[in-house]
């Protein structure tokens, strides 16, 4: 009977894996916040120097970020930060809208799966939306809105839906940061798209909840598209 780690057994060292994850986290954050711009080249030598690590974990990090959609591997150019265009925004929001629609259906169809604790959390976030909308800085409103969407998805208790939806949240954060979007009617958004959606969920009104969800995402897409250079 063989033993794990016996002579001749090849195992991936944990430090190398951790290094690749750390590199990916650092590069991803720079892309999301806009410090690395769309179309910017990601030169391995520069990355290894800045991160103080060897090329192998940096290459693994770039492969991971390529699978996530943040990096594009181009022939003769290497890795570049993925561009922001109308097609990518539409794709992200169509997927998020569809996942949310499915979560609401699971949450509110037939015998409701909505737990009291989840409803309480949604109520708290809905009330936060009204409070934060009155503040001059929009950052709390944006974070709270993403948390509200995420809470709806998590309440449906569909692990894959949660994973896919959460994976796209980073792209939405990138859209906000790179396009420097300004939400000029946050109080209206809080009433019409957050509190109204919470009320529909509270009343177990599936059709109304899905209608508001769709309108919320359609409005978000239109706001982004007006900021994309033609």
Image: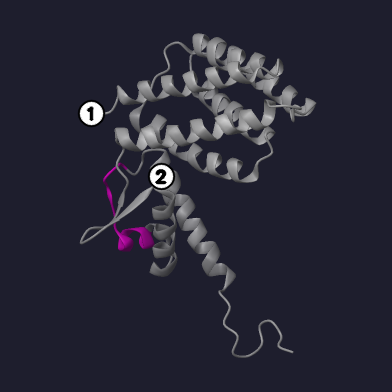
State which tag comes first along the sequence, 1 or 2: 2
Horizontal side of 77 relative to 198 (left or right) equals left
- The residue drawn where x is 41% and y is 29% is 176
- Splitting the image into 4 quarters, where does residue 166 fall? top right
Tell me if residue 42 is in the magenta stretch.
yes
Q: Residue at x 34, y 29 (%)?
A: 179
* Residue identifier under label 1: 229
Q: How many marks?
A: 2
* Residue denoted by label 2: 30
97, 4: nearer the viewer? 97
Q: Residues within 10 Å of mark 1 (few under 14, many from 20)?
A: few
Whether 92 is among the magenta residues is no
- Which numbered mark, 1 or 2, is in the foreground of this view? 1
Across and down, in percent, residue 153 comes to 62, 33
User: Which percent across, then down, holds residue 156?
Assistant: 67, 34
> Quarter-wise, where is residue 2 in the image?
bottom right
Q: Mark 2 packing: few (<14 Cα in 10 Å), some, or many (20+)?
A: some
- Structural distance between the alpha carbons of marks 1 and 2: 22 Å
Q: Residue at x 45, y 10 (%)?
A: 185
Give the image's coloring scheme: one colour
Q: What is the quadrant of the N terminus in the image?
A: bottom right
List x then y, in percent, for residue 31: 39, 44
Q: Do the residues bearing badges 1 and 2 touch, measured as CB atoms within 8 Å? A: no
Q: Which mark is residue 122?
A: none
Q: Which residues are magenta?
A: 37-49
Left or right? Give the position of 187 relative to 202: left
x and y, in percent, of residue 147 in the image = 59, 29
Q: Is residue 172 left or right of residue 190?
A: left
Task: Name the residue: 31% across, 37% down.
Answer: 84
Mark 2, secondary structure of its residue: helix
Q: Is residue 34 above or below residue 196?
A: below
Q: Nearer the viewer, residue 145 or 104?
A: 104
């Amino acid at each position: 009977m063989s033993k794990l780690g016996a002579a001749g057994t090849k195992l991936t060292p944990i430090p190398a894996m951790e290094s690749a994850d750390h590199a990916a986290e650092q590069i991803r954050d720079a892309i999301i916040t806009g410090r690395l711009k769309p179309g910017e080249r990601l030169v391995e030598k520069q990355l290894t120097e800045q991160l103080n690590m060897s090329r192998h974990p940096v290459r693994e990090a770039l492969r991971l970020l390529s699978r996530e959609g943040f990096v594009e591997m181009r022939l003769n150019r290497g890795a570049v930060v993925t561009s922001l265009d109308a097609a990518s925004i539409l794709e992200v929001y169509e997927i998020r809208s569809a996942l949310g629609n499915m979560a609401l259906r699971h949450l509110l169809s037939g015998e409701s799966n909505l737990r009291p604790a989840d409803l309480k959390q949604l109520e708290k976030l809905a009330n936060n939306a009204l409070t934060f909308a009155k503040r001059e800085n929009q950052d709390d409103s944006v974070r709270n809105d993403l948390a509200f969407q995420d809470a709806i998805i998590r309440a449906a208790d569909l692990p894959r839906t949660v994973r896919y939806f959460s994976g796209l949240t980073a792209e939405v954060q990138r859209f906000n940061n790179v396009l420097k979007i300004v939400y000029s009617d946050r109080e209206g958004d809080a009433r019409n798209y957050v509190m109204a959606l919470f009320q529909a969920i509270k009343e177990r009104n599936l059709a109304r909840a899905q209608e508001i969800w769709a309108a919320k995402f359609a409005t978000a897409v239109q706001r982004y598209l007006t900021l994309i250079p033609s």
